[in-house]
Image (tube, rainbow, N blue to C red):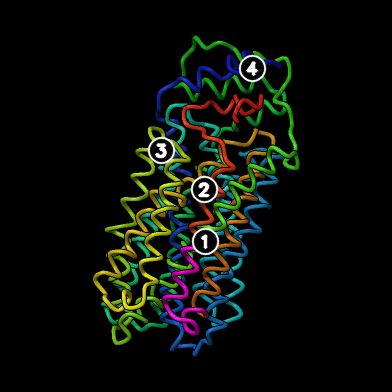
Amino acid sequence: MNTASYSASLKEQDESTVNKYHWRIVFTAGTGFFTDAYDLFIIGVVTAILTPLWHLTKFELSWLNGASLIAAAVGAVFFGTLSDKLGRKKLYGLEAAILVVGAIWSACTTSFTGLLMARILVGLGIGGDYPSSATVVSESANRKNRGFLVLLVFAMQALGLIVGPLLASLLLSLHIPHDYVWRILLGLGALPAASVIYLRRTIKESKRFLMTKEAPLEVGRVVHDLVDGHDDLTPPTLAKGFKKQSLLSSKWLKCMIGTGGAWFLMDVALYGNGVSNNLILSTLSPHANILQHTLVSVLIFLVFAVPGYFLSARYIDRIGRKPIQYMGFIVMTIAYLLIAIPGVSKIVPLFIIIYGMSYLFINFGPNATTFLIPSEIYPTSIRAKAHGISAAIGKCGAFIGAFTLPLLLASKGMSYVMTMMAVMSFLGIFATMFIPEMKNVSLDEVEEGITA
């Protein structure tokens, strides 16, 4: 099949405007991402509460912070691989159900081992959501607004970052016994996940996936919905379906260095920063209590992190993917090097400003783009699997950050840790060179290998 026939087959969707079906998909996927962020980051507050209650060691603390991240890596590969084999629709919603079970189990456990196992289950669900949601939204979007729609889903992570610490602050300020507070915080993660299971189970199958299965009539029905029910659509021109490709080919392995490598390097800094936020603030202000540290965390997230998410969504289709990713890694490198200067961490206002700027440009930068890019640059037959593997590589970086940073902070100090983060961020600049730019490029062009 030539390039012209591919372009004609889905031109109606690519050139359509954003409509109510797009918004439904964004809401359905975004609510799950709110839960993912809430569950991943609330553990930092929970472990701060549990440490004196359960007398957690540094080793146990690191495992609780990092267990769900390793499980997320497994879940991302598992769900991504099956999504390419069975379809986007068949599995979508299962990851949310796993999150519900994991959250309830987490809230009810009475031992370190039980909580660790529950966090592993939560991680499997979170990992599955990455390739599933990214692929569903990317393949349903129009060409002009694809980056905006995918990153609008990702921006729901910002709300999870805010709601978790705010709930923790509220519960702590009410002087509820701490043994109840952490259970409530973990258990509440079940609610948003449960609310979207039905919506996820009832979405339509991706027409691009159907084209890999040579189902032109079904493709026509799905495209009809995506372009707001127009009756004058040109039927898809399909002599045969999209060509199946191998992730082991040199071209896609090169892309994997870019998508997986950049995600890994970014996540070392992001999750090391986020999950260990209370530990970092404790080092700066050892006499403040958990509530005070949590409120400062909320302020940092609200002022710096949240705008970064929405700036990415707003400008991704104007500026492009690679320029935003380059910019983010460069600013992160500079910010971490500044914090690493001896004495800077002792000037609390200056530290918070620089630390906050690193959050802004993580999110108006590689945290957003590493989620988007794998959902675009790979062909349909391997898209979800490639996204899942990229996310898994990223979560391995997240585990390293979450597991080792508390230990390094205790043994080596702030300057050493921030220097390591600066090195990771600097290497991310080079990983970005391996990916193509997808601004204003149709996903159909990927099928013919047009993207460079």
Residue at 52% in and 63% down: 268
Give, as a single range, the part of the protein colored magenta: 408-424
Horizontal arrangement in the rendering, residue 367 relative to residue 446 (left or right): left
> 251 and 39: which one is in front?
251
Locate residue 90: give its quadrant. Answer: top right
> From the image, which quarter does the C terminus lie in?
top right
Question: Measured from the top left, where is residue 14 in percent x and y?
Answer: 50, 22
Asked if residue 186 can be seen in this view, the reply is no
Gap between marks 2 and 4, in whole Å? 27 Å
Residue at 34% in and 61% down: 163
Question: Measured from the top left, where is residue 238 in percent x and y?
Answer: 68, 16
Gap between marks 1 and 4, in whole Å? 39 Å
Asked if residue 404 can be seen in this view, the reply is yes
Residue 251, disc: none
> 245 and 319: which one is in front?
319
Gap between marks 3 and 4, in whole Å? 26 Å
Q: Is residue 342 magenta?
A: no
Gap between marks 2 and 1, in whole Å? 15 Å
Question: Can you identify the residue that label 4 sits on?
Answer: 3
Question: Can you identify the residue that label 3 sits on?
Answer: 316
Q: What element does badge 3 sit on?
A: helix
Question: Can you identify the residue that label 2 sits on?
Answer: 370
Q: What element does badge 2 sit on?
A: helix
